[in-house]
Amino acid sequence: MAAVAEQRPIRLVVRDTELRRSRLTVFFRLFLAIPLFVWVTLRGIAAFVVAFVLWLAVLIEGTTPQSLHDFVAGYLRYATQVGAYVFLAADPYPWFRCQADYPVDLEIDPPVRQSRWTGFFRLVLALPALLLASALGGGLTNGSSGQSWSASSGGGGEYAVWYAFSSGGVAAVAAFLAWFAVLARGTEPRGLRDLTAFALNYAAQAGGYLLLLTPVYPTSDPKRAEPYSDLPEHPVRIVVTDDLERPRLTVLFRLLLAIPHFVWLLLWSVAAFFAAVAAWFAALATGRVPLALHRFLAAYTRYGTHLFAYVYVVGRRFPGFTGRAGSYGVDLEIDPPERQNRWTVLFRFFLAIPALLLASALGGVALVVGVLGWWYALARGRMPEGLRNLGASCLRYSAQSYAYLFLLTARYPFAAPVLERRAEPEPDPSPLALPGDAF
């Protein structure tokens, strides 16, 4: 059954439930996509020209002609399908036209009346969304509209998706990791697929807003991923109890106020390094991290989450210096020590490298969230809920990655950008799952 995100004029539809991928086509995926790059570039140029006509129509009549709207919407759908294929979120070849039954597709509402003022300044108003789309990635859906994402256009043209891989972005990193996982196992990790789908969804919203398909501003709320994604049970969970109000004065001087914390974090990191080494030897010998070391490293991980939640304006209050559980509005719940497989402990550093790569990419997204949230909070005195939740999701994955590295848990981090489990969750993965089973 297809999973559809509701209540938005541009919605991502995910029909792929088995996650099986052909190793042969995945191995040669970029080469197979070369004709698609050429065709989507040509369609992108045409869509950019038509979007200019749509812009004039909005200024004159306050709405867009149905036929021109459908042409640009068709391009956006096709670009999303190509992006899903290139970034391994889907397996069938998209060929050279929109496919109604493609595993990853868009639903786009008909044209509605739009404000002439927001239409006139659409490019300027879209810049924050385009900046976030650049960090998230999402492939060719950022094209022909002048967006500056790693696979975006310049001057109305389209760059090829291979440029997106070379320039970074969460979708590119997720696809890079998924490529190895598929070659080894024949299936894509669920978390990586869901993260890529979320990036495609946001890129499509940003592209649709810029191309005047909708007057509704894109939302980065991870709730958009809930129809096709779920968060398995994990020993490291983020809990958000903070409100959205942000005092302008503390927001203005947030980085200066955080300087003492940065100094303390540096000192604590030195001690945490030696504690992690000691925990590694202890876990090799006994199969379990001693409770004292577990508490010390858990407090350090929690403190880092508190601090960066404050720096990125995800959290409101000035954090404490101890990393105490329950002391901050964006907090971590970390389960007690558990028995761990000595083989996974022995190679823990190497096993954690893929997760740390993805955590680094998500850290770039959190930085963009902080920059955009800083300006918005200065202007409005509050943090947008979508940005706050996306920042919290990035912090969750980072915390799970470092908890795995520090042997606080044997469970691999899960990349799906959601904050809470559904009421009826799917079966949990094995607690000793290797990287190919998780993400």
Image (tube, helix red, strand yellow):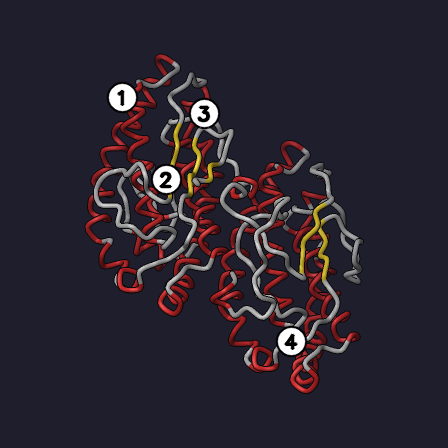
Pick the front one: 204 or 46:
204
Q: In the image shown, does 123 or 67 lie closer to the viewer? A: 67
Please say if 160 is above or below 246: below
Query: Do labels 2 and 3 touch, CB within 8 Å?
Result: no
**Residue type at the position of mark 2:** Asp
Q: Earlier in the sequence, mark 4 or mark 3?
A: 3
Q: Position of residue 111 (x, y in %)?
A: 38, 21
Determine the residue positioned at 35% across, 50% down.
Answer: 90
* For marks 2 and 4 on the same chain, the one whose residue lies earlier in the sequence: 2
Q: What's under tag 4, amino acid-wise?
A: Gln
Q: Does residue 300 lie above or below 247 as drawn?
A: below
Q: Which residue is mark 4?
A: 340
Q: Which residue is mark 2?
A: 105
Earlier in the chain: of badge 2 and badge 3, it is: 2
CA separation, marks 4 and 3? 52 Å
Q: Is residue 417 visible?
A: yes
Name the residue: 79% across, 75% down: 292
Callout 4 crowding tier (Cα within 10 Å): few <14, some 14–19, many ≥20: many
**Percent x, y of residue 270:** 69, 75
The label nearer to you, 1 versus 2, is 2
Distance in Å between CA atoms under marks 4 and 1: 60 Å
Answer with left or right where residue 82 lies relative to residue 286: left
Badge 4 or badge 1: first in the primary sequence = 1
Q: CA distance from mark 2 to mark 4?
A: 41 Å
What whole-number distance in Å separates the C-alpha atoms at marks 1 and 2? 20 Å
Q: Looking at the image, is mark 4 or mark 1 nearer the viewer?
A: 4
| Residue 67's disc number | 1
Q: Mark 2 or mark 3: which is in front?
A: 2
Residue 351's label in the rendered image is none
